[in-house]
Image: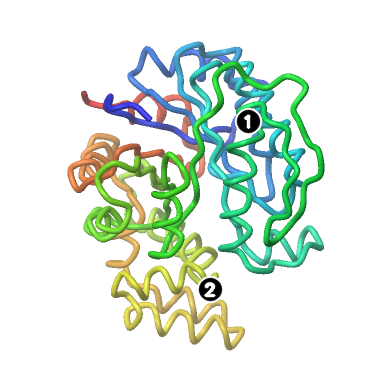
Amino acid sequence: MGSERRWGITLPLPAIGLADQREVVAGLSALGYTDAWSSEVSGTDAFTPLTLAAQWAEDLRLGTAIAPVYTRGPGLLAMSAATLANLAPGRFVLGIGTSSPAVVQRWNGIAFSRPYQRARDMLRFLRRALAGEKVTEQYETFAVDGFRLDSPPAVPPGLALAALRPQMLRLAAAKADAAITNWLAPGDVPAVRAVVGPDCELVARIFVCPTTDAEAARSIGKRLIAAYLTVPVYAAFHAWLGREETMRPMLDAWQAGDRKGALAAISDQLVDDLFVHGAPGACRERVAEYQAAGLDTPVIAIVAPPGADVAEAVRALRPAF
């Protein structure tokens, strides 16, 4: 999806009301940012921040990272994507993924069943629907009978798939235009790149806490690591990357219900590997290490320490190129 050097940011920005982010978002291109990618867990949805950004910033590539493939039906997901693609012609990427059992099953009451097949089927459906085709198809995990977009986008959006381990990474390389990954160190990038191959765009969200207070940053990082890496799919991802023994004490404590013990079992080294922190210049250099290792599009997620000026952090973390 293009060969220019990319540098992204996660929207919405923390600690600033969504409606109050216009000035910062409008200035991102001038700072050198090329991309803005949303997220969707339990805050804003994936599409609304990008709808605003499409009006506020005319040069940014916009992407969802990610919209879950269970929580919207196929037709609704296609309509949301087509709407944004029409608002930002040629610069929208629909990033989809399976999300997690907590989001899908516990929070939305939908069975988290056969994730690989669901992602594959949704990619197949979206490719046809966003091209304006009328779709009648019995997929393995759902059926669509006679769906056609009323206003298909003149430029269909690119498709990206959230992927961690080899099977899903290979699916992204084969059926999508990009693979989106998460929670990895620069030294992990070659392993992921080796699976997706040289021609699939590789996108990764990178959590960045721009502060020189290492103790505070590591405390924040440990809480995030405990929240994410205890999810089975992330635990399996890091086992594949070779961290099974490193993470075992944290996982054992978490599974036993000992949340304090799980936090205490996370080493500073693990935080420093996976969570970028330090002075803004050092953070930028660390993010650039991901690109040097084979990442195409780093997407910075600013983790704001208490009292931080987020708008200033955005300016300070701009690309050096």
In the image, what residue occupies the spot 50% across and 11% down? 58
Question: Foreground: 176 or 257?
Answer: 176
Residue for badge 2: 232
- Which colour assignment does the render follow? rainbow
User: Which amino acid, by three-letter code, is at mark 2?
Assistant: Pro
Q: Percent position (x, y) of residue 94? A: 56, 36
* Residue depicted at x 34% and y 57%: 184
**Can you identify the residue that label 1 sits on?**
130
Q: Quadrant of the C terminus?
A: top left
Asked whether 6 or 28 is in front, the reply is 6
Vertical comparison of 132 with 300: above or below: above
What residue lies at 60% left-to-right and 26% top-to-bottom? 50
Query: Of 135 and 280, which appears nearest the observer?
Result: 135
Residue kind at label 1, given as amino acid type: Leu
Instruction: From the viewer's perspective, tell me whether residue 83 is left or right of residue 304.
Output: right
Report which quarter residue 301 is drawn in: top left
Q: Is residue 240 above or below residue 245?
A: above
Q: Which of the numbered marks, if any, corresponds to residue 13?
A: none
In percent of width and height, residue 101 lies at 66, 66
Q: Nearer the viewer, residue 315 or 48?
A: 48
Residue 268 placed where, x, y %? Answer: 31, 67
* Res 299 quadrant in image: top left
Neighbourhood count class around disc 1 (C-alpha, 10 Å): few under 14, some 14–19, many 20 upward: many
184 up-or-down from 135: above or below = below
Dot in front, 2 or 1: 1
- Residue 20 placement (x, y as % from top left): 63, 20
Task: Find out whether the residues at labels 2 and 1 contact each other: C-beta distance under 8 Å.
Answer: no
Above or below residue 319? Residue 135 is below
Looking at marks 2 and 1 on the same chain, the residue that comes earlier in the sequence is marked by 1
Considering the image in quadrants, where does the N terminus appear? top left
